[in-house]
Amino acid sequence: MASHNHFTKSRSNLSNMSDANDPGRPSGPGKVKFITRRTNSGRYVNYSRDDLDSELSSAEFASYTVHIPPTPNNNQLMDPSISQKVEEQYVSNSMFTGGFNSVTKAHLMDKVIETETSHPQMAGSKGSSCAIPGCDAKVMSDGRGQDLLPCECDFKICRDCFVDAVKTNGGICPGCKEQYKNTDLTDMEDGYGGQRGLPGPEGGGSSSGSKMERRLSLMKSTSKSVLMRSQTGDFDQNRWLFETSGTYGYGNAFWTKDGNLGSSSKDGDGDGEGEGTEMQDFMSKPWRPLTRKLKIPAGIISPYRLLIFIRVVVLALFLSWRIQNQNQDAIWLWGMSVVCELWFAFSWLLDQLPKLCPINRATDLEVLKEKFETPTPSNPTGKSDLPGLDVFVSTADPDKEPPLVTANTILSILAAEYPVEKLSCYVSDDGGALLTFEAMAEAASFANIWVPFCRKHVIEPRNPESYFSLKRDPYKNKVKSDFVKDRRRVKREYDEFKVRINGLPDSIRRRSDAYHAREEIKAMKMQRQQNRDDELLEPVKIPKATWMADGTHWPGTWLTPATDHSRSDHAGIIQVMLKPPSDEPLHGVSEGFLDLTDVDIRLPLLVYVSREKRPGYDHNKKAGAMNALVRASAIMSNGAFILNLDCDHYIYNSEAMREGMCFMMDRGGDRLCYVQFPQRFEGIDPSDRYANHNTVFFDVNMRALDGLMGPVYVGTGCLFRRIALYGFDPPRSKEHSSGCCGGRKKKSRVSEENRALRMDDEEEDEEMSLSLVPKKFGNSTFLIDSIPVAEFQGRPLADHPSVKNGRPPGALTIPRELLDASTVAEAIAVISCWYEDKTEWGSRIGWIYGSVTEDVVTGYRMHNRGWKSVYCVTKRDAFRGTAPINLTDRLHQVLRWATGSVEIFFSRNNALFATSKMKFLQRIAYLNVGIYPFTSIFLIVYCFLPALSLFSGQFIVQTLNITFLVYLLIISITLCLLALLEIKWSGISLEEWWRNEQFWLIGGTSAHLAAVIQGLLKVVFGLEIQFTLTSKSGGDDVDDEFADLYMVKWTSLMIPPITIMMVNLVAIAVGFSRTIYAVIPQWSKLIGGVFFSFWVLAHLYPFAKGLMGRRGRTPTIVYVWSGLIAITISLLWVSVSPPPGTTGIGGFSFP
């Protein structure tokens, strides 16, 4: 306990320091040494090692410097609400860059893109210019973009000039020469309104909206650990509970002793009527859940389970019979077949056992709205009480991932039906390309039109490209008279938007060439001025930079790579494209482009992030980029939940986020680590030749896993609980003794409430030590302080006695913090390449490193800690994306997945080493994930067995007796019946099931085998083999939507399936020839071999069709020569090895 007391003292000292004057604080622009924290008054509190005790002295801190220009936040005379809003406007117009051993700089940008922007939230938006002579800066503006004028004379003045006037001119207005009378501009702002704090003991909220009141401890912790305190230390929650006579009661939520929530006063003078929340208010009406389970009807699931049992018994009997009845004529053929059949039975069992308990789920959005967005005594205004949500979009290469596709995904997110002030979008550009940056800026500009249009007319889907490409009637169910006019205008704007996006590469190249030519001319002039002699001058060599729209160097990757400006070597970049919206709705006006009188025109927070990359660091690809977003978002918005999407997966159902939140906010939802949505795809050929829809996996396997501990994480379309990503255990996790024989559960002396943030490697009755926090999460105090806030906000609503670990109703209706320069500078620090050194990021925290399929491993780690997940299948598809329809691209996609599975099998993430917290059937499912690629070895052997049987004239059994045929018939019938029942309870079609079976064999004989070879070489010899495309050829029909389907790209993965097809075709011809010319034809062996050969060829038919290219384009001579070659080979084989009793064919024999 000594360490806990020590920490309490240290934190209290830090809190006191934040309220004390710091004489050493810089008063103007300059370099600020960051191992500090910046308070709302502008003071800096030292968080360096010298001020902490020896317990923290072992942790390593990195110092970094930030250039912060003077802002009104540094002036004690200015009203805090004004200073914060003005600084946020400055931050949104600045690009922050920095990284390892470099200065973090804020580059003020007067324009982000070539075109003008008018939305007040967007970076570089146009506005009125300052009236001070010689100053062309923009004046302060409110939520609508209207000028904020501090003086009654309406003299236009910018932020910097206003600071100078207050500091150096005695607060005299430069226009009317009078003293500033109105420094509180709250009444002039239409979009910001009054900001309420959490109801205090007097039931009132603060109108100033200071940072302390906005952070009014959303937690009720009594812990002394760093993870159990408020975010800033400015407010003591326990003291507030004491002063309000609070107590802990129903569902671990806060309730006052008299039953009111924050509305009673000690003296009893408050009327309290209609202001407090009593438990009877919740109990007076029936409690309604947000979700419900829809069990599979007993008439379907009972026969399904019975068939599984019957097939297991029949397989056991069949394999026993096969082992006992050997084929002495071809013992080698019998041996190979038996080994393969044993493995197939084992593999089928691994795949089938987790399917014993499939379930369906449904959500109730009306109940969600009633609980979180309907006026109640604890939330009189009906403001949204939903938690914050951060959406991550990842992209890496604008050449492979078109910026227009990414921009459409961003637009669908910004227009989603979720509280605007609670939604944030972060775009990770791992390539650091200016093309992606400007495309996102164009998307933010177009969102000013698109998002209000979607809200006004309830547009679905809210991806403009998909919406305007719909083939159905766009006017169906539209009742507003101006819809046709609005749609026509928005369509024209979107066409112009696409032209601008498509023209960005040329625009950037021309701009960079022009600026480069200007720089060369300047350099030549300077060279001539310095050298006045007539000597021959050498040509001036200047690095060819990439230039931004404001005429400055792009800090990321240049078109012509150079030092500090390449894909693997560039600074970290953060640009707030759309600053955080105002807390209150902001309605548009009837004037202008659209009539938006009753439409909320606010836009969610949009941030561009490109993490720092430097040579010598392992950046861990997508997993590293996602972890950088986790840390940056925790600093800037700290949403309790995270939705990650690929750049080509857009929101098809605008209510999808709310449906996912129903699971997280329902009773017991605090034990859910993520909600996985199914992946749905567009642009797939109607026949789905290569099973791109993957419906068997998403509608059968995933629904079945939902009945256990939950589905696996598949990389996109997943709603995460932030705390689960941080590596904590779920609340109320069971404690197991370390003895080999079990034993009774030890009783913890730590209350369950204080154990909400625990890791399984901690002592039973001790909390996380302060010295361990930087070693786990890094040395960012901003990040560490955000963890308990995110945990509290993610709790379900404590509106029923059975809800455990809940939060009080109305606790999340307070406004979010305004962004300041120090916050964004801290975000730059946590995305630097050095931040993860000597921490647990990637090993236990965040996305897990070390595997190609980091998604499966990340989900496995969460389930291994005892978390659960759910599968959310919505009536309208939640998300839609694209999938490769080309055969080669599809094989390489499957190769990557299979390679990751092999890596999992040979790592400590193998389900064989799972903890006792994971259920048995869930462990079987994860074990199958790592084992399924190895089936390819046995599958290829089995595909060659029919050909070997036909070539040798033998079969896998001695004779086709009745026992073998009965077993084969029962096994086949039970397989078909199981498939029909799966189709019944999952809703897939028979064709989809058959396509999946076909591609299972195609992938198993190609990509899976290559993955096994690649994994074994990596594990045994440490070699990594990359299977790349060697050549390609395709059609020239660019108007065909499915032209890529017929494109033939040669790859080495095609060799095994082609060999199997050719060998089986030749074997069939040889078998027929041998049987026809035999003295005693053995038709039973021929039929057995031909049957299994046709089984192999039927599964490989889509593969053969893909090799043929476009229909009608394959020359007839190809078929003729193929037939002639097959016949010739078969005749040669019979001649070389004639049937018994003959010497040749028709009396002919070789000499």
Image (cartoon, rainbow, N blue to C red):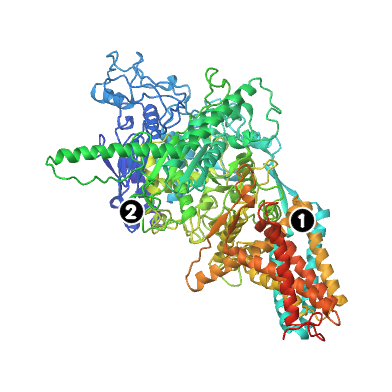
Q: Nearer the viewer, residue 449 or 744?
A: 449
- Closer-to-camera residue (589/1070): 1070
Q: Quadrant of residue 937?
A: bottom right
Q: Does residue 618 appear left or right of residue 879 in this picture?
A: left
Q: Quarter of the image containing the C terminus?
A: bottom right
Residue 223, image x, y percentages: 46, 49
Report whether 531 appears left or right of 496: left
Vertical side of 130 occupied by 891: above or below: below
Give residue 982's mark: 1
Q: Distance between the residues labelled 2 and 1?
A: 56 Å
Q: Badge 1: how crowded within 10 Å, few (<14), some, or many (20+)? A: many
Q: In the rendered image, which quarter is residue 1122 located in?
A: bottom right
Label 2 or label 1, whichever lies nearer to me, is: 1
- In percent of width and height, residue 1000 lies at 68, 61
Give residue 227's position: percent from left, percent from top: 45, 50
Residue 906 shows up from this direction: no
User: Tag 1's secondary structure?
Assistant: helix
Which residue is denoted by mark 2 in the rendering? 61
